[in-house]
Image: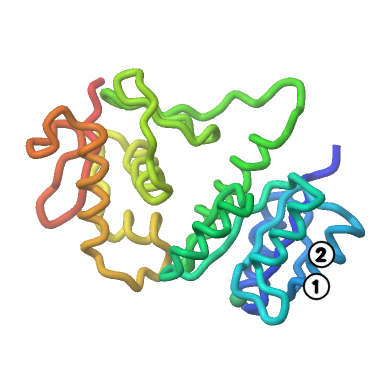
């Protein structure tokens, strides 16, 4: 079986090269193009298993590329947007994008989105066993992008999901603030570190019986957070 092929549409040269390198290292077959016209031509010529599409492109914009792709194909599309362009994310999802990351993103985040979307799209006979992280009331199916709290499905926004994953893979251990910021929001971290506390509060609202006195997602003062392990 051939490795999955990924078409990357990105005009920023450094980022494009880094994507090419990292995705190839993950075992994908990677084609990188730098504008929308090339993207459509390339996709028509060779088709791809997944498209990573920057929305800010010179000439034919990313949203137009997406619209034209969707006219003829259900290929999974992960869009890349600037952090402050929430409207683009909404438009992209409405036009049929499957997922998105916002710049700056971590390579790990993008790779996990790519593999989750490829898996979701594949109609192969035996799906691989998915990775389920469990602690306390939470069961998180990373590949299916699903979280259950006390057995009930609960929606988590992408950053909340990443943050929960970063805590759960280290359950019972202190996770330093800087580690969480870089892993979830990208490295180097440029933003307001308070964003971490805001997202922790949202996680607590979804996970804790009483978010004001958390028993699962606890603060380790001055250092970071810990997801308490029941076992
Ligand atoms: Ca761009």
Which residue reaches farthest left? 213
Mark 1, Cα crowd under 10 Å, few <14 / some 14-19 / many 20+, is some
In percent of width and height, residue 174 lies at 23, 44
The local crowd at label 2, few if under 14, some if 14 to 19, many if 20 or more residues have their Cα within 10 Å, is some
Quadrant where the C terminus is found in the figure: top left
Which quadrant holds residue 23? Answer: bottom right
Residue on which the image places disc 1: 37
Question: In terms of image quadrants, where is residue 151?
Answer: top left
Residue 201: which numbered mark, if any?
Answer: none
Front position in the image: 179 or 202: 202
Secondary structure beneath dot 2 equals: helix
**Quarter of the rendering occupied by the N terminus:** top right
**Does 80 sit left or right of 127 as displayed?**
left
Q: Ligand 1 sits in which quadrant?
A: bottom right
Q: Which mark is residue 40?
A: 2
Q: Residue at x 64, y 35 (%)?
A: 120
Q: What residue is drawn where x is 27% and y is 51%?
A: 199
**29 or 173: nearer the eye?**
29
Which residue: 74% across, 47% down?
A: 75
Q: Residue 197 location, x and y as percent?
A: 20, 54
User: In what element is the residue under mark 1?
Assistant: helix
């Amino acid at each position: 079986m051939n490795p999955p092929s990924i078409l990357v549409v990105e005009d920023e040269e450094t980022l494009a090269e880094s994507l090419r390198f990292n995705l190839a290292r993950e075992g994908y077959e990677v084609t990188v193009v730098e504008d929308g016209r090339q993207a459509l031509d390339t996709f028509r010529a060779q088709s791809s298993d997944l498209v990573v599409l920057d929305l800010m492109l010179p000439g034919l914009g990313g949203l137009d590329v997406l619209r034209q792709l969707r006219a003829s194909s259900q290929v999974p599309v992960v869009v890349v947007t600037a952090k402050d362009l929430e409207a683009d994310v909404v438009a992209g999802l409405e036009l049929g994008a499957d997922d998105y990351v916002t710049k700056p993103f971590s390579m790990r985040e993008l790779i996990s989105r790519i593999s989750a979307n490829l898996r979701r799209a594949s109609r192969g006979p035996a799906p691989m066993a998915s990775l389920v992280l469990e602690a306390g009331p939470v069961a998180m199916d990373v590949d299916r992008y699903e979280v259950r709290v006390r057995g009930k499905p609960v929606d988590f926004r992408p950053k909340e999901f990443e943050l929960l994953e970063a805590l759960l893979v280290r359950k019972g251990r202190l996770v330093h603030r800087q580690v969480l910021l870089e892993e979830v929001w990208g490295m180097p971290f440029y933003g307001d570190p308070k964003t971490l506390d805001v997202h922790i509060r949202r996680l607590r609202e979804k996970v804790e019986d009483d978010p004001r006195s958390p028993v699962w997602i606890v603060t380790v003062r001055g250092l970071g957070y810990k997801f308490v392990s029941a076992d």
